[in-house]
Image (tube, grey):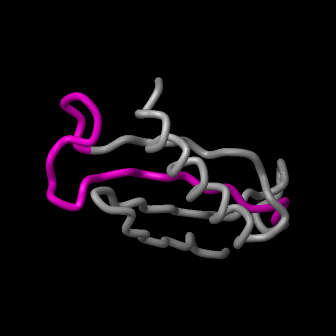
């Protein structure tokens, strides 16, 4: 089994943490269908990111054929959330 890939990106005053992992085909423990990523946004100084929340979570997006594309998507979703003020 492949292990998740974690990437931390500083985008002051925020830190974006992207965790990408393989998505397995239904009913298979070894056949990878693609990769998905989840992002977490924190502040570099430890203060709340949004309202009183210390973290802002962006859940897994679509499935990508390769790990790098999934990671880029996770980062882009986080940057979009930062740029739009963390919508619900």
Query: In the image, residue 50 lies at what x, y percent?
Result: 28, 34
- Position of residue 30 relative to residue 54, above or below, is below
Residue at the location (31% across, 62% down)?
12
Q: Is 25 on the left or on the right of 7, as rendered?
A: right
Q: Is 30 on the left or on the right of 41, as rendered?
A: right
Residue at the location (28% across, 57% down)?
13
Residue at the location (80% across, 61% down)?
34
Image quarter hosting the N terminus: bottom right
Q: Nearer the viewer, residue 79 or 88?
A: 79
* Magenta region: 32-54
Query: In the image, residue 79 lies at what x, y percent?
Result: 51, 51
- Position of residue 18 relative to residue 55, above or below, is below
Q: Quadrant of residue 59?
A: top right
- Which residue of the protein is positioned furthest toward the top in this rendering? 88
- Magenta residue check for 34: yes
Q: Is 57 on the left or on the right of 33, as rendered?
A: left
Query: In the image, residue 85 lies at what x, y percent?
Result: 41, 33
Q: Quadrant of residue 23?
A: bottom right
């Amino acid at each position: 089994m492949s292990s998740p890939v974690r990437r931390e990106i500083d985008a002051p005053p925020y830190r974006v943490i992207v965790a990408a992992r393989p998505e397995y085909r239904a009913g298979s423990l070894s056949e990878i269908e693609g990769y998905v990523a989840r992002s977490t946004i924190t502040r570099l100084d430890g203060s709340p990111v949004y309202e009183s929340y210390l973290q802002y979570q962006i859940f897994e997006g679509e499935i990508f054929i390769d790990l790098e594309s999934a990671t880029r998507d996770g980062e882009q979703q986080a940057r979009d959330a930062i740029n739009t003020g963390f919508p619900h």
